[in-house]
Image (tube, grey):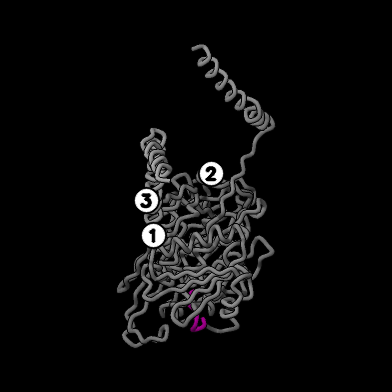
Amino acid sequence: MKKIIENIKEVFKKLFKGRNLKHGTNAVLLILMVLGIIWFVQRIINSYPLQYDTTANKQYSISDQSRKIVKDLKQDLRVTVFVKRSVLYEKYMISLLKDLAKVSSKVKTKIYDLDVDTTAAKGYNIMEYNTMVIELGDKRKDIYERDIIGQDPRRQQQGGVEFKGEQAIINAILEVQETGKKIVYFTDGHKEKDSDDMKTPAGAAVIKQTLIGDNYEVKKLNIIKEGKIPADCTVLVVAGPQQAFSAAEAEAVKKYLENGGKAMLLLEPLVNAGFDSVLANWELKMDNDFVVDTKSCLNLVMYSDPASPIPEYETHAITEPLIKNNVPVFFPSVRSISELEKKKNRTIVKEKLFMSSPTSWGETDLASLKSGKVRKDAADLPAPLCLGYTVKEIVKAGKEVKKDNKKETDYETKIVIIGDSDFISNAPGGVGGYQGGTELFANSINWLMDEGLKIAIRPKTVDIRPLLLTPVQDTIVWVMTIFVTPLLVVGAGLFVWWKRRGR
């Protein structure tokens, strides 16, 4: 027995002194070290992720406005999501929530599977898949999948998908923080753009949905029937009237603005809208012209196509996001705006939004538009021409004025005037075809309401770019993949074998 034990010891001594064990142990230790380094590096990457959004429309990036809103949260924002396994929703929504949580520790997220976590779903009274609940204090806002993922109206024929997750969450946060609803009134009764019309190209229902998505309430207003501008009107929109406002209606608008009102006036060429006295009160006038630009334009059949100008942006809070993101806007038909002599004892701040290019002119021979044979002559207005203005005036009331349930002694009038309204229409020339029209209108409304934080938080288009090959290119790819690449690999292997065999 003693001899057997000694033999076993001798075997183990030889085993541990052997070269195989020594090399094997070194290999195991080396593998463990490599795995440890990989684990350590992975932990660092997870803690400090480095990401860069290379997509053309920055669809994976959070806007600066969103970051500011989230960073300014004073209390915990509870975001609870009830999902059904949906690749598109999960890919964008869950990723967005993680990014928002990285911006502020006050964003608390919980994600449930609606088919599994039925108890939690009943507690929140959830009835639909992919429902998100935003809670701040005792206020709650529900966001549904249809509010987040929809068809891009600019790419309907290509089946484009629009992701509105960031817009929906940020506006939900603003909504639970607000104490009241802000109302945008569209004037009615003068053949203006119809905010309820989704079926025709001339309607403005797409822009209405944008306003609703930004947490505004949208109503129509017939001034003749009402006799005045309602007290709850936050912004008045006059969207391309084709018939003139009466003197009484224009006076009602003027009084509304003089008492700190906000308005967006979109006045088409070739139409006398009856706003001369209103604009003159703020030192502006609509020129009786039609701006033509044969170079800086987008060819579109409008009035026998004298051209549809693409304006050059001036620096302003409204246009800054458009300039930053290189988003163009064009006006299918536009007139210019001029300044009048300054009024004494009034401080009116007028700022230009955009100008026509040096190659444009203001066509005053409106009869020539019907024939389509327009040409620049001495009677036309020379470039550059202003196509849009903002007006701001702080009025010393001298008495207490009730505004937004508060008593103030001063109030501010703000107006946006643009010589076109087609850019907000459902048509391809408007927001239905180009993102710039949506952003210009939404940014203008937000500026009028002093809500600059909402400016430029627009939906992201899920950019799908298919690779389309010609038959010849398709054949080349097939041959390279099936024959050439495998033959190169096999040939390289045979060459190495032959060289080694020769040695």
* Residue 193 visible: no
Mark 2 vs mark 1, CA separation in Å: 26 Å
Q: Find residue 374 and report its horizontal and vertical position in percent.
A: 57, 46
Please, what secondary structure does the residue beneath circle 3 have?
helix
Q: Which residue is mark 2?
A: 294
Q: Residues within 10 Å of mark 1 (few under 14, many from 20)?
A: some
Q: Find residue 139 and report its horizontal and vertical position in percent.
A: 48, 81
Please, what secondary structure does the residue beneath circle 2 have?
loop
* Above/below status of 366 relative to 377: below
Q: Earlier in the sequence, mark 2 or mark 1?
A: 2
Q: Which residue is mark 1?
A: 316
Q: Find residue 438 and report its horizontal and vertical position in percent.
A: 53, 60
Please, what secondary structure does the residue beneath circle 1 have?
loop
What label does residue 165 carry, if any? none
Q: Nearer the viewer, mark 1 or mark 3?
A: 3
On whether residue 81 falls in the magenta region, the answer is no
Amino acid at the residue labelled 2? Thr
* Above/below status of 378 relative to 281: above
Residue extent of the magenta highlight: 229-236
Which residue does the image show at 36% across and 70% down from the upper left?
72
